[in-house]
Image (spheres, grey):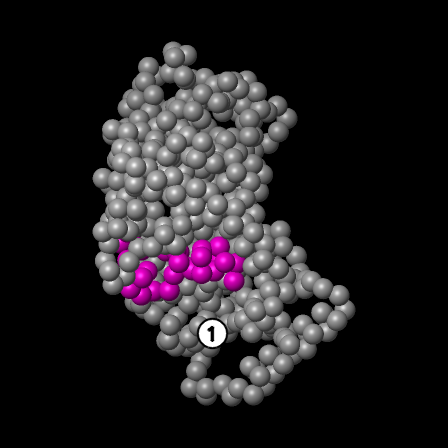
Amino acid sequence: MESDSGSIKSSGGTWGVVVTLSLVVLWYARLYLYRRPNSNSRLPTGPRGLPLVGNLLSLHPDLHSYFAGLAHTYGPIYKLRLGTKLAVVITSPSLAREVLRDHDVIFANRDIPAAGRAATYGGADIAWRPYGAEWRMLRRVCVVNMLSKATLDSVQDLRRKQVRKMVGFFYGRVGSRVNVGEQIFLNTMHVVTDMLWGGTVQEEAAGEGREFREVISELTGLLGKPNVSDFYPGLARFDLQGVVKQMDGIVKRFDEIFERVIDQRLRMMKEGIKEKEGSTDFLSFLLRLKDEGDSKTPLTIIHIKALFMDMITAGTDTSSNTIEFAISEVMNKPEVLEKINQELEAVVGKENIVEESHIHKLPYLYAVMKETLRLHPVVPLLIPHCPSETCTVGGYTIPKGSQIFVNVWAIHRDSSSWENPLEFDPTRFLDSEWDYTGNDFRYFPFGSGRRICAGIAMAERMVMHALATLLHSFDWKMPQGEELDLSEKFGIVLKKKMPLVAIPTPRLSDPALYI
């Protein structure tokens, strides 16, 4: 559900509206009027809804904060009727543990929207694929092969090259207003696409970052757009709002790019063209795995393209938004920025540039990143889970097929778990063992259990390297007369409502360090 969405409007003329309403009424009658509830079931309480639409019309665009407000009235677990779908919202660490740890296998499936299915080749990716042998194979490919420490180390030079290009861009605009968030996004996108295929594919096939930038916002917007097909699955075949049709058009543009880079790589392999020495990328690993993989659950070209889609859509927005929020927060806290600068000067020095080898020696900056992810978790409601069978959570019956939202944004701001929860205070992470493993359900920005994010190691490297570099290389200030805005815009991925526009000033003594 997207933050700037209004009420849902079906397309077509008067006849289309009549047909649509008739179908909805028939669906509602069959589902509700002729189905007797199980007398033994005890559903969570929740706000009263209207016939046909349930609670759809009362939803607020900022769902994360709206859901947090409802929890104050209805408790840490409550239900909503979204058309014919039953949604359950979880807003406490103990209940999150029940869903993501105690009943992990039952809740390991996703509630995939029609747009998500269209975007990922029928749900052939790791984010939306139902739990099972094929998903386990994809997870293994990502964690053990594609995103392992050895593989990430092997593409370190590709990441370094793009970060230096970003520094050069900002250096060329010293003293001027710069849309910092936009440039961080572009850098992150180039880093991701370079890691996917840019190391060995010829330059004209690898430089697709500009085209991706134009369509990613369209794609993520459609993923979050309220869609009649999701609230009334019986109507999905009609695609009344044209969401799937629009998504098919976007995916076609991505697919053309994927086909080009894959075909070129296969041609290079067939002709015996060797990769540059010391240079590799994820496409190389994936094509080898495709040829050498398990015959019972093989990795296919469709899987590779679906994984590419995951990496591009999830790997760009999430990392770039975290960096943008972090820079904004420290600009708003001079005492925090001063401590960061002291640490960077002690570890890196003003005569050197930041390298990835430095980032594990920067505990205070790590704490800044963790605090940023506490206040602004990248996926505030996680990706909705869907129980494969009816079960009990918190003493309530959760029916099979329900849509489960875990409000990690609200849990991270719970005053019973955090002192001064709305205050940006990195020191709370200095003297503790907080991590991203999802073992402590007071802090789990990347989820927990089987469906925990597979790209944590990559995100950590990308965010820390870029954040350390930008703060080490430049001082940042707001244009005269403008105030820093830290407000959020809800979406599948949380963003700043207003992009960060700031003026860079060099901090390093030698201009050659900016080349």
Residue 61, image quadrant = bottom right
Q: Is residue 117 left or right of residue 303?
A: right
Instruction: Determine if the magenta segment contains residue 54.
Output: no
Query: Is residue 502 visible to us here?
Result: yes
Q: Position of residue 507 (x, y in %)?
A: 42, 17
Split into 4 quadrants, where in the image is the N terminus? bottom right
- Taking the image as shown, residue 488 lies to the left or right of residue 293, namely right
Pick whichever, 295 or 362, lies toward us: 295
Range of magenta residues: 114-141
Q: Is residue 313 above or below residue 408?
A: above
> Where residue 98 sits in the image (x, y, percent)?
34, 66
Foreground residue, 459 or 253? 253
Which residue is tagged 1? 44
Q: Residue 94's spot in the image, x, y percent?
A: 35, 63
**Is 506 rendered above or below residue 359?**
above
The residue at the point 60 percent across, 79 percent down is 28
Question: x, y percentage for residue 33?
Answer: 59, 86
Residue 117 located within the stretch drawn in magenta = yes
The residue at the point 37 percent across, 29 percent down is 468
Residue 384 visible, this orientation: no
> In the image, what residue occupies the spot 69% across and 62% down?
11
Q: Could you tell whether 44 is left or right of 277 in the image? A: right
| Left or right: 147 in relation to 219 | left
For the point 29% across and 39% down, the residue is 269
Tag 1: amino acid? Pro
Asked if residue 183 is positioned above or below residue 309 in the image, the reply reads: above
The image quarter in which residue 347 lies: top left
